[in-house]
Image: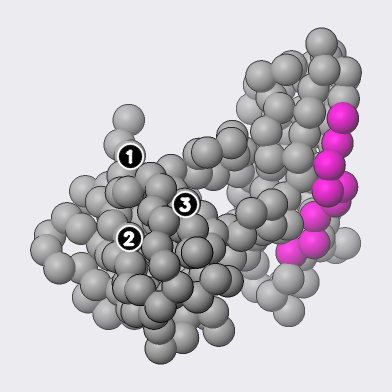
Amino acid sequence: QQQVKQSPQSLIVQKGGISIINCAYENTAFDYFPWYQQFPGKGPALLIAIRPDVSEKKEGRFTISFNKSAKQFSLHIMDSQPGDSATYFCAAGPYYNTDKLIFGTGTRLQVFP
Amino acid sequence: EPEVTQTPSHQVTQMGQEVILRCVPISNHLYFYWYRQILGQKVEFLVSFYNNEISEKSEIFDDQFSVERPDGSNFTLKIRSTKLEDSAMYFCASSEVGSNYGYTFGSGTRLTVV
């Protein structure tokens, strides 16, 4: 009940294209779903997060889509840029306490010019 | 912008030696965490710490591991007798009381056990 499954493992997209990364969770008690962006040699940095009271959240070129009944959420990067090349981790956990976040296995995104 | 600071950035140690990884969490955060990431793999939870005691620990966090908040600013992870499989990036994180929002990671310490 504690796994977060993430796909694909790697993704190659041309500049200007749409990058889509998918995650599925098991624990229905989770109500906080962040995405982290990690550049080589750096720690994960919070990119965008969603709570289950909405089905979509958009911040600039980054959008999270959330399907509560399917226990799935996805990250869409519109107009992907070479600077977006990084590893992306989805995570899930409870919002109103600080129990651990469970991380997905990561997606290595490469955006080519 | 407030940061979580980790030192050293890279440590090489011989198998069987003790290592201490250091972290300075964000000053107004009260929950602290250690995670590790074996090269190319997912970020795995090790331990959470609040009010000077461990809140939760994973199966990875066995008797070889310990955490401490020796003063008002530092948060340390000690590995008593390192094994080859302890080689990983170790990330410290901190968060505000009562919420996972604002969970901030440091840049990590790359531990290499030889």
- Residue shown at 11%/63% (left/top)? B71
Q: Quadrant of residue B43?
A: bottom right
For image coordinates 59% across by 34% down, the residue present is A39
Q: For this rendering, which residue is in front, A2 or B58?
A: B58
Q: Position of residue A73 (x, y in %)?
A: 79, 51
Q: Is residue B45 visible?
A: no
User: What is the residue that sits farthest to the bottom in this orientation?
Assistant: B63
| In the displayed structure image, the side of residue A18 where residue B2 appears, left or right | left
Image position, residue B55 (x, y; %): 38, 79
> Where is mark 3, residue-wise?
B110
Side (left or right) of A108 relative to B8: right
At mark 3, the secondary structure is strand
- Identity of the residue drawn at 40% across and 62% down: B13
Where, by quadrant of the figure, is residue A103 drawn?
A: bottom right
Q: Which residues are magenta?
A: A4-12
Classify 10 Å Cα crowding around label 2: few (below 14), some (14-19), many (20 and above). Answer: many
On screen, residue B62 above or below A66: below
Q: Amino acid at mark 2?
A: Leu
Q: Given this view, does label 2 or label 1 mark the residue nearer the observer?
A: 2
Report how far apart the C-alphas of labels 3 and 2 lie in the structure: 10 Å
Dot 2 corresponds to which residue?
B21
Residue under label 1, please give it.
Answer: B3
